[in-house]
């Protein structure tokens, strides 16, 4: 799957042009295996733009409950909006909004309960990467966020090294492949039903490096920030994904 994470970008006019362009570019392939996570305010616009297509539209985040929580979007609102998937644990949420594994585990549980596919984001800092602590960090994040509670067939993990996000720097695709295999093993051994999750890579994916990632066996797709804001570039990346993963 290829997911566009628009973060706090987009406006009604440019979103409309983006959706129209994607539909034109994907007219032969169709919109399967594509997800978009726009801002909450644009969710319905994007959902309606793709009403006749099988594109998945999701949230970038969710709160753990509803009611007296000013400024929040609750899990039941996500269900009501027909949200297909929801990112949780993005490093920007962890860093800017002080979210820790404990709060992310509550979000994870609420999504499973609400039958919304969680896309759990994990990743190490540059210091941890340099110190060879990547796997240790990822294992802790997975175990603390899902807490052995793998009842969802639909769990997807997004591996996003913090130092690769928006920086133009990426780890070597072969190393990412090894890390993804490790992530699948960790989830599988914690899973009641032997689940091996889809693992997406995120962090400075663009149309020049996408093929190098998608050629790797354990890289099941990508979570794309900056390069997803341009419908043509995003379409180019989807075409590269199709060539490597949908043969
Ligand atoms: P960039 O693709 O801009 O590096 O962002 C990655 C990301 O954070 C997706 O969630």
Image (cartoon, rainbow, N blue to C red):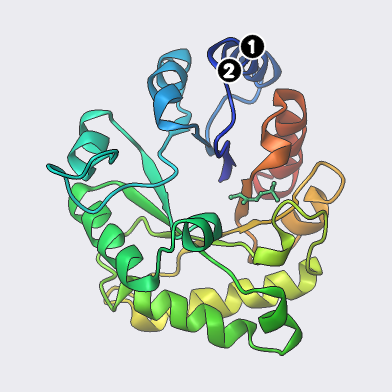
Residue 217 visible within the image: no
Q: Which of 95 and 128 is in front in this view?
A: 95
Q: Residue at x 29, y 46 (%)?
A: 116
Cα distance, mark 1 to mark 2?
5 Å
Q: What element carries label 1?
A: helix
In the image, is 118 to the left or to the right of 65?
Answer: right
> Dot 1: within a 10 Å radius of its alpha carbon, few (fewer than 14), some, or many (20 or more) residues?
few
Do the residues bearing badges 1 and 2 touch, measured as CB atoms within 8 Å? yes
Check residue 17 in the rendering and tell me which mark sits there, or answer none.
1
Task: Determine crowd level at label 2: few under 14, some 14-19, many 20+ residues with C-alpha closer than 10 A.
Answer: many
Q: Residue at 45% across / 23% down in the picture?
A: 42
Residue 228 sits in quarter: top right
| Residue farthest along the left direction in this orientation | 67
Q: Where is residue 35 in the image (x, y as percent from the top left)?
A: 51, 37
Establish if 159 lies above or below 165: below
- Quadrant of residue 133 in the image? bottom right
Disc assigned to residue 125: none
Residue drawn at (23%, 48%), measured in percent from left and top?
115
Q: Position of residue 192 (x, y in %)?
A: 27, 77
Residue 148 shows in this picture: yes
Query: Residue at (20%, 45%) from the top-left corner?
Result: 69
* Position of the C terminus by quadrant: top right
Q: How many marks?
A: 2
- Horizontal side, residue 171 vs residue 180: left or right: right
Identify which residue, 227 or 101, lies in the foreground: 101
- Residue 129 position, x and y percent, is 71, 80
**Camera-nearest residue between 12 and 173:** 12
Give the numbered dot on residue 15: 2
Q: Is mark 2 within 8 Å of ligand 1?
A: no
Q: Image quarter for residue 206?
A: top right
Image position, residue 213 (x, y; %): 76, 58
Above or below, 16 against 58 in this view is above
């Amino acid at each position: 799957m290829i997911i566009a994470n628009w973060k706090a970008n987009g406006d009604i006019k440019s979103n409309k042009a983006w959706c129209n362009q994607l539909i034109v570019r994907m007219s032969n392939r169709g919109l399967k295996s594509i997800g978009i996570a726009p801002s909450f305010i644009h969710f319905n616009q994007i959902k309606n733009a793709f009403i006749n297509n099988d594109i998945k539209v999701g949230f970038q985040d969710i709160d753990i409950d509803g009611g007296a929580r000013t400024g929040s979007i609750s899990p039941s609102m996500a269900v009501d909006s027909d949200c297909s998937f929801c990112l949780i644990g993005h490093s920007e949420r962890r860093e800017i909004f002080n979210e820790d594994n404990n709060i992310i585990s509550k979000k994870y549980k609420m999504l499973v309960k609400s039958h919304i596919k969680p896309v759990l984001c994990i990743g190490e800092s540059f210091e941890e990467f340099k110190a060879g602590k990547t796997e240790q960090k990822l294992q802790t994040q997975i175990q603390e966020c899902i807490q052995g509670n793998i009842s969802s067939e639909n769990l997807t993990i997004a591996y996003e090294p913090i130092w690769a996000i928006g920086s133009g720097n990426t780890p070597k695709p072969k190393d990412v492949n090894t890390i993804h295999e490790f992530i699948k093993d960790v989830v599988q051994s914690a899973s009641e039903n032997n689940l091996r999750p889809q693992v997406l890579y995120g962090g400075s994916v663009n149309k020049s490096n996408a093929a190098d990632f998608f050629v790797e066996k354990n890289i099941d797709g990508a979570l794309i920030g900056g390069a997803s804001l341009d419908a043509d570039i995003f379409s180019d990346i989807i075409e590269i994904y199709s060539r490597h993963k949908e043969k």
